[in-house]
Amino acid sequence: MEFPRRFDTITIIFNPNSTGDAPTLAEELSAELVPALPDTDVVLQPTEHAGHAIDLARDAASAGNALIVSVSGDGGYNEVVNGVLSSGSDDAVCAVLAAGNANDHSRVTGRKPLAEAIIEGQVRRIDVLRISIGPAGTDAVYAHSYIGFGLTPVMAIDLEKGSKGAIKEMFSVARTFRKFKPFEIRQSDGERRKFDSLVFANISQMAKYATLSEAGDQPTDGKFEVITFPHMAKWRILLTALRATTKGLGDQPSYAQYRFSTLKPMPYQLDGEVRSVDAATDITIESVPRALSILG
């Protein structure tokens, strides 16, 4: 018989300056959990700057027998996941209460309302992605949902420059798409290939609308899907994107590890957050099976 997991501490991390309703959602979650779990210390922990959630999550996880909740979108949750996985704790658990724009991870992997899941205490483990930069792989970070090169980060950069809102987002995407140029990489077999988009997906959906693959909604097979858009005419890219948002892209090849080298500096997107990598850099992306304990 599996007993409900009870935590010594539940740390709820949120951005107090969020343009959304993260502060309100965090307070509501705390108000629901405190009377339901009287023996658990429920802590509201606001962030003070970008990247602060990594440190807060690492500290909370290091205390042991802790649940760390991110009230955020996919990018904020990425910080919490990286903080927990870098803590060295094997018994810390993560959860996300959706408060962002896309909320891909919560939408795909969520099973029930978060407060209900925490009170029930049924913990499960899922795979994560790890991207290692450089020949020694020392600069390694994790992604809970996807890593994207090409169109994905370029459009994200342009969206961040503008304002939120469906109409403005649409114009930003159209403007970026007109200017977009493909990128080239050297694969592990030495072959150079040109792409418009290259996405490594731990979940089957991204960007609110696109269904990338037929993979299940619980990433636990030790592999990830690789969705490629080889360089093609822009009208063909549009048709492929339309298919992703309507029927889905169907079955995609899956890997436990994928290696390549950049030829020029380029941006990439990690669970919604944009980063960059230098030219002539070795990249290794791999699945880390059942590395993350979650609720929700």
Image (cartoon, grey):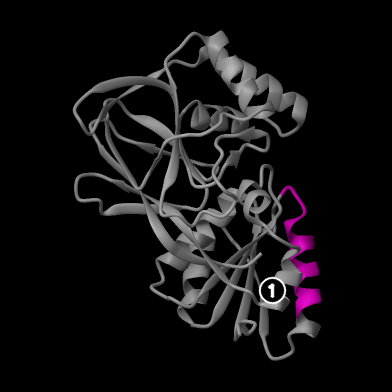
**Which quadrant of the structure image shows residue 170?**
top right
Q: Is 25 covered by the magenta stretch?
A: yes
Task: Give me the residue at 78% from left, 83% from top.
Answer: 36
Q: Quadrant of the C terminus?
A: bottom right
For this orientation, the residue located farthest to the bottom is 39
Position of residue 198 relative to residue 202, above or below, is above
Q: Provide the major secondary structure of the magenta segment.
A: helix
Q: Foreground residue, 158 or 113?
A: 113
Residue 41 location in percent, x, y? 66, 85
Residue 143 location in percent, x, y? 47, 51
Position of residue 121 relative to residue 196, above or below, is below
Q: Is 114 covered by the magenta stretch?
A: no
User: To which residue does mark 1 refer?
Assistant: 118
Q: Foreground residue, 215 or 38?
A: 215
Position of residue 187 relative to residue 90, above or below, is above
Task: Give me the residue at 20% from left, 50% from top.
Answer: 136
The span picked out in magenta is 19-33
